[in-house]
Image (cartoon, rainbow, N blue to C red):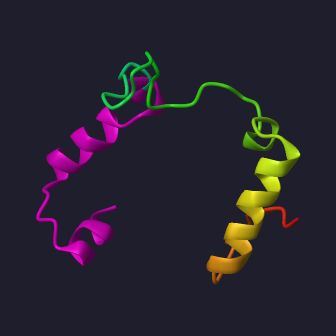
Amino acid sequence: MQSIVEYWGLGLDESSLRFGLEESSKEKMAEKSDPDSEFNVTVIRNNKRSFMEWYDEEQLNYIGNICANYLKYDFGYEYRKG
């Protein structure tokens, strides 16, 4: 992590870096609410369902087409193209 801090020129010392890592654990983040949501949602997804189950076929095809048209690399994500 220190090499990332140095690369980006963040100027964080070891104790600040450690504190940030501890405060950003999944458990700690799950305790926080999304302040921009009108619903009481957390910033961590606890639902184990794949995002592919959240959308119908038309929506998946739309997302897949957008990604196929505008992404240079898919980084291993399998977006569907309709």
Q: Is residue 20 left or right of residue 25?
A: left
Q: Quadrant of residue 20?
A: top left
Instruction: State the quadrant of the N terminus.
Output: bottom left
Residue at x 60% of width, y 25% of height:
46
Magenta stretch secondary structure, dominant: helix
Residue closest to the far top: 40
Viewer-closest of 54 and 25: 54
Q: Is residue 35 left or right of residue 62?
A: left
Q: Position of residue 41 (x, y in %)?
A: 46, 21
Q: In which quarter of the image is residue 6?
A: bottom left
Q: Position of residue 77 (x, y in %)?
A: 73, 63
Q: Where is residue 31 in the image (x, y as percent from the top left)?
A: 39, 19
The region drawn magenta spans 1-29
Instruction: State the quadrant of the C terminus.
Output: bottom right
Q: Is residue 4 left or right of residue 14?
A: right
Q: Quadrant of residue 67?
A: bottom right
Q: Position of residue 49 (x, y in %)?
A: 76, 31
Residue closest to the far bottom: 72
Residue at x 18% of width, y 53% of height:
14
Residue at x 84% of width, y 62% of height:
80
Magenta span includes 2: yes
Say if 45 sits above or below 58 in the image.
above
Viewer-closest of 21 and 58: 58
Please count the marks in the image.
0
